[in-house]
Image (tube, rainbow, N blue to C red):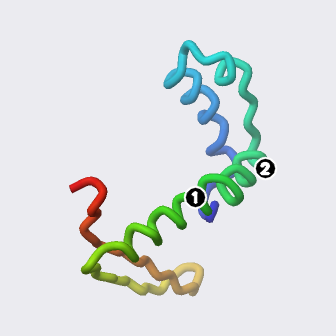
Amino acid sequence: MYNGFSDNSTQDVVDLFKAMFPDCKIAERMLLGPNKLKCVVNHGSDPYVKDLLKSRVISTDWFVVSFDESLNDVTQKCGMDICIRFWNKETS
């Protein structure tokens, strides 16, 4: 899910796509604001990546889940990072 990015972080994305795809007419005419980027991530790439990761982890024989839970002293909010390590049969 689209979290932790400032709205200003979208400013350079269009220039990045234009540099990555210099011959592409779509990239040349592309406009992307903060709200549109959030929509693309939340409803486009995020569900796809989650489903892909889930199917690959389920299809493996072994996997390890690690987590790190911490308290931010300034905001007094807890955060948890989760790391999944597995052998990807499709690329081995």
Q: Which residue is mark 1?
A: 48
Judged left or right of residue 18, residue 34 is right
**In the picture, which quadrant includes the N terminus?**
bottom right
Question: Secondary structure beneath disc 1?
Answer: helix
Q: Tell me: residue 92, above or below residue 22.
A: below
Residue 16 image point, x, y percent? 54, 29
Instruction: State the count of labels.
Output: 2
Under circle 2, the secondary element is helix
Picture quadrant of residue 92: bottom left
Which of the 4 image quadrants contains residue 62?
bottom left
Q: Residue at x 71, y 58 (%)?
A: 43
Residue at image coords 54%, 79% = 74
The residue at the point 57 percent across, 85 percent down is 77
Q: Position of residue 64 (x, y in %)?
A: 28, 81
Residue 8 versus residue 85 in the image, above or below: above
State the mark number for residue 29. none
Q: Vertical placement of 51 versus 80: above or below?
A: above
* Amino acid on which disc 2 is placed: Asn
Q: Position of residue 8 (x, y in %)?
A: 67, 44
Q: Position of residue 75 (x, y in %)?
A: 59, 80
Camera-near label (1 vs 2) is: 1
* Disc 1 and disc 2 in contact, CB within 8 angstroms: no
Q: What is the spatial separation of the Cα atoms under label 1 and label 2, in whole angstroms?
A: 19 Å
Report which residue position mark 2 lands on.
Answer: 35
Q: Along the polypeptide, which appears first: circle 1 or circle 2?
A: 2
Residue 68's place in the image compared with 85, above or below, is below
Left or right placement of residue 44 versus residue 57 in this view: right
Taking the spot 60% from the left edge, 26% from the top edge, the residue there is 15
